[in-house]
Amino acid sequence: MTAEVKPRMAPKPNVYVNTDPFWQAAQKGELVIQYCKDSGKYQHYPRPVSIYTGKRNLEWRKVSGKGTIYAHTMIRIPGPGLDGRLPLPVATVELDEGVRMIANIIETDAGDIKIGARVEVAWDKITDDFQYPAFKVVKG
């Protein structure tokens, strides 16, 4: 006889990691990332402990918002929240601080989105009072 497997519960915001500093900074147009004070390194995605030391000696620090496209793709299939946004370029961006983020690419011609292209943070206004970090290619 096989035991019934119950579905896993989806994590709730701020249960495991308090991400409020990230969202508060975003609303001010600032990009912040978790920083391990013991190792002197950034980490992303947010975690309750340092990936370098296993300690909780973490803080949120403002970063430059500049980086390089590490990989990219184009979303063409409709899904929740994508109405009127397709095709939507998405990239893995390696920030100058050494962490990678997956983000939308906005304000950029599709032909300019290439591996190795330099990008900077751009703010994707989701509603009148909420913006989300995205990136745009820097020409030059």
Image (spheres, grey):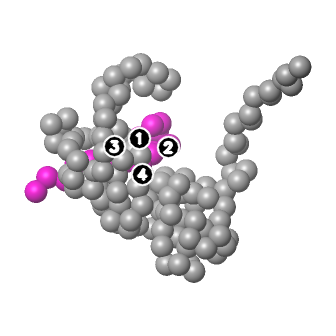
- First to last magenta residue range: 123-140
Q: CA distance from mark 1 to mark 2?
A: 6 Å
Q: Is residue 73 left or right of residue 114?
A: right
Q: CA distance from mark 4 to mark 1?
A: 18 Å
Magenta stretch: dominant SS?
strand
Q: Give the SS element for disc 1.
A: strand
Q: Which residue is pictured at 30% across the width and 50% down the height?
A: 70
Which disc, if any, is residue 86? none
- Tell me, yes or no, if residue 60 can be seen here: no
In front of the other: label 3 or label 2?
A: 3
Q: Quadrant of the N terminus?
A: top right
Question: Which one is in front, 12 or 93?
Answer: 93
Q: CA distance from mark 3 to mark 1?
A: 18 Å
In front of the other: label 3 or label 1?
A: 3
In front of the other: label 4 or label 1?
A: 4
Q: Which residue is pictured at 66% across the width and 56% down the height?
A: 17
The residue to which callout 3 is attached is 91
Disc 4 and disc 1 in contact, CB within 8 angstroms? no
Q: Which residue is pictured at 10% across the width and 57% down the height?
A: 140
The residue to which callout 2 is attached is 130
- Examine the rendered structure and indicate whether residue 43 appears above or below residue 132: below
Q: CA distance from mark 4 to mark 3?
A: 8 Å
The amino acid type found where label 1 is placed reads: Lys
Which disc, if any, is residue 125? 1
In the rendered structure, which disc, 2 or 4, sits on the residue that comes first in sequence? 4
Percent coordinates x, y for residue 3 in the rendering: 86, 25
The amino acid type found where label 4 is placed reads: Met
Residue 82 colored magenta? no
- Residue placed farthest to the right in the image? 1
Question: Which one is in front, 53 or 91?
Answer: 53
The amino acid type found where label 3 is placed reads: Ala
